Every structure is written in C-alpha cells, then in structure tokens.
Amino acid sequence: MKIMSKSVRLAEGQKCRGYPLVNGWEQDAGGIQNYTQPFSLPDLDVHLFSGSFVEAGGIALKSPWSCYAEGCRFIGPVKSSRRWTWIKTYLHRETISLDAPVVSLVNCRGWQDQYFHWMLDVMPVLLLASKAFARPFAAFKILVPQSPCPYIQQSLDTWKVPEHARVKVIPGQRVLCEQGLCLSGSHRFQERGPQRPHDPIHPLIPALYKEMPLPRAVSERKRRILIYRKAGAPRAFQNFNDVEKFAHEEGFELVDLEKLYFSKQALLFAEASHVIAVHGAGLSNLVFASGCRVLEIHSRLHGVRSEFFQLTSLIGGEYRFVVMDGNVADKSVMFPVEIAKAFADGA
C-alpha cells in the first residue's frame, strides 16, 4: 500500500515571553510559575495521509509493520513495545471502510470522556483540520464515541457538524480510508525541559472557539458569574450559605454548569466580566471569554495547576488565584469570602 502525505503549517514555532501574574496573596504559584518565564512553542502542522488506516485513537498505519501515531511533539514511528502490542491487538477488530478524509475524535486515552480534554485536546483536532484544508465539517468522516456524552453531542450540534458526517466507533476500531488526518507539533504538547514547560496551550485554540456560532448575539451587559458544584460533589463549597450571601451582595450569578446546555455555557462566558470558580473542567469555557477577570480557587489536595492561568492570559484577561485547605473525605473547600470581596472590588 503506497502512502502519500500532504502537510499544512497552521502556525510557526514561536518564543513566548511569559504571561504576567499578579500574586496578591503571596502564595506558592506551583505550575503557574513555569509560564511566567520565557518558553517556546513548536510548529503546528496538520498532515493528510493518503492510502492509510486510521484507528479510533488517532493512529495512522503505513503498513502492518510500521505505524505513525499522533504524538505529543511530532508524528514518528511507535517504538514502545507495549504500545505496539496494544496496536496489534486492536488490528484484529472488524474493519470499516470510509470514502472521505477521516478525523478521529476518539482518543486512545479516553480524553473524549472528560470535558477539559474534550475542549482543549480532542475537539480542536477537527477545528484545526477544517481550517488547514479549508473544508467544511461535512467534507470529513468524523469518528465519535459509540455512546457520546451529552456535551459531545451538544458541542457537535452547536458547531453544526452534520449527523451524516459522524461515524460512531469503539476505541481501537480499525478504519480503512483513503485519507486520514493527524496533527504534529500538537496544540497541547507534553514535553518537559528548558524553556518548554508541561502542557502549554497553543494561542490558536481560543481563537478557533471564537468562531463558534452562539444562540444569540453577545450582550453588552457584562455578567459576574460564580460557578459552584452541587453538595457532595468533589470541590464543592463547604460554606455555601456564605457563597449565596456574597453573590447577592456583590451582584454575582450563581451558576451550576452541569445544568446548562453547551451553547448556553459558551454564551455565559462570552458575556462574563468576572468569573469565580474552584479549579475544574468548567473553566475550559474560558476559551469563549474575552478580557474577563478570573479568580480560581485551588485546593491544597490537588495543588496549583496552570491551565486556566494560561487560558486567561490568552484571552487578554486578568488572573488571580487562592489556595485553600480541602476536606480529605469529600474534597470540599472553603469559599474565601474576604478574598472574593477584594477581587470583586478590583484587587
């Protein structure tokens, strides 16, 4: 089987000077500190392989003996014997044939089943492929989970991805196609080293989400939102009565994102001027925001993470954070009332 490939470069590698951080409460910045220093991003390329197999975990096979995987930094031969054993196991599954370029939204790590990874790792594969080759979603066959989560179905509907373009598969499903798409350089590459910290988010990602159709025009009225989790959920607020009182006095909307349709979450963040939330997947919706102020509450049980500091910086916003003790039993945290008031007043 002869393999040919075509590559489109969406972004040249670049040096970043680092993002500004105001650490008003003088706390340990954890992984955030890596992004306040200069770091580098690689080239971002999309590859179109012709005459290839594409597996539902994002693997393009050149022959039964060599394969190329969508890796963290580049597309290259799979050298891990454990991974190759995994690949050979799934090669014996039933093969389906598709007559259009294939994009897989089923990740071998199961990332499609986690909202944060769906927004920052999985869905961007389709958005970048469409942008690179200037093709509508209908021009692809898009591999989706056999039983998609509600947010997967809702996000594809919001992007107007036609049903006939969606092909339901199980992880490891073998797909025979004329053309398959993979990324290299990746939009979120996982490589550690000097000037390359773990998991930087490419600036193209929030820019792509700004093109998503919303249910109505973005209002000029800026909204203050406070995201909470239902009682008993991990990282719920212990002192919810204080949260309700604060929201009433400071003009914040109390929002449970799990109750909102995907497009309404997007609109909410697009109209936000202030966002307060415990660290969690819901803050992935910052890709829809512009220039808002963010107060992220971290629990000492999971440490200080950098993802939403990066996103806030990429959308031109102002980021603040606070680290609170967490309850080991239910992972709940205290809402920092005085710090939240200072944040609401502009600190």
Image: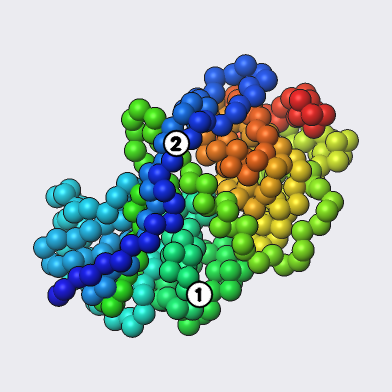
The residue positioned 47% from the left and 70% from the top of the image is 134
Q: Which residue does the numbered mark 2 point to in the structure image?
A: 15
12 and 264: which one is in front? 12
Q: What count of labels does the image hold?
A: 2
Instruction: Give above or below for 290 relative to 191.
Output: below
Q: Which residue lies furthest to the right in this view?
A: 249
Can I make out residue 55 in this image?
A: no
Q: Residue 136 carries which label?
A: 1
The residue positioned 41% from the left and 76% from the top of the image is 141
236 and 24: which one is in front? 24
Residue 76 percent location from the top left of the image = 22, 53
Label 1, secondary structure: give it: loop
The residue positioned 52% from the left and 39% from the top of the image is 307
Instruction: Give above or below for 78 relative to 322.
Output: below
Residue 18 percent location from the top left of the image = 52, 30
Q: How crowded is mark 2: few (under 14 residues within 10 Å), some or many (20 or more)?
A: few
The residue positioned 77% from the left and 63% from the top of the image is 217
